[in-house]
Image (spheres, grey):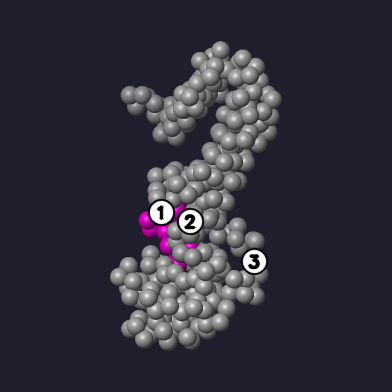
Amino acid sequence: MDRQSADLVMVFKTNIRTEGDVHCVSGMLNAQQHITEWSVDTEDVDCVLRVLSCKVQCHDVIKLVGLHGYECTELEY
Amino acid sequence: MRTRDLVKEELVRQKTVELVVEEGLDNFSVNKLAKTCGISVATLYIYYKDKDDLIVKVAIEEAKKSSARMVKGLDPELSFAEGLKKQWKNRIKEMKDFPEVVNFFEQVRASKYQEKVFPVFEDALRDKLGKFWTNAIKRGELAEMPVEVYWSIAFAPLYNLIRFHREGRSLANKPFKMTEAVLWQTFDLAVKALKK
């Protein structure tokens, strides 16, 4: 899906630390049709999860990631 | 909607170069960069997906600026010797004025980012340098030769002198400092070797 101009960038601190962890959450994040793009920077100390969407809200992402047993808190700008 | 802050973007590029030079590409992280810039981690992630994306984007911007400086004032109609001299001067100026950028690109060249970044230099330089080269051949000043042969004679001697100068030593540990006389003697010999 291409990035939409109305998309908001949401940024979270997580403990999605390894490629294996990324694999664990990828199925559920890919399945969200309103998420345009997502990525995890496993090289960063905060294992930052970045989500682009025009409909999904921060608390939705936190809940989804939490359901898979990972910590996820919103990073303040 | 958050607006783009151009001053901050410039600061991010400058600090990325500094951090990579100081700590190496492996030790660089978006978190460290945010602290150095005094901005939040989240702000950086608005513009960049991750560390790789940030380094590639910053390096591409720096490559565009650096290549523009390298061909600054180079008129493709200049005689071969004059045109090559201008390029030597630009390259020396780049090393003197932007040593950190030069250092940064040395690290990028030896990394996985190389293939995404170096084509930017080639694209930016191809037009002007290509014209200059073709003109010199057309005028009969320069023999036709593979580009690798050309580069090895036209620029490698300069970079070797710079290496000696930076290390402060030449062969057999002999102290060395590049002087104008040594520089332009080398240049004259390179031109002599290349000219038809």
Q: Amino acid at mark 2?
A: Ile
Across and down, in percent, residue B180 comes to 56, 24
**In what element is the residue under mark 3?**
loop
Which residue is label 3 attached to? B4
Which residue is label 2 attached to? B55
Whole-angstrom CA distance, mark 3 to mark 2, is: 19 Å
**Residue at (41%, 34%) from the top-left corner?**
B167
Across and down, in percent, residue B187 comes to 54, 21
B19 or A37: nearer the viewer: A37
Where is the C terminus of chain B found, in terms of image quarters?
A: top right
Q: Is residue B97 visible?
A: no
**Residue at (63%, 29%) from the top-left corner?**
B131
A33 or B195: nearer the viewer: A33
The residue lying furthest to the top in this view is B196
Across and down, in percent, residue B119 comes to 51, 43
* Crowd rating for badge 3 (residues with CA inside 10 Å; few <14, some 14–19, many 20+): few
Across and down, in percent, residue B69 comes to 62, 40
Chain of the residue under the numbered disc 1 shown in the image: B
Which residue is label 1 attached to? B25
Chain of the residue under the numbered disc 2 shown in the image: B
Whole-angstrom CA distance, mark 2 to mark 1, is: 9 Å
**In what element is the residue under mark 2?**
helix
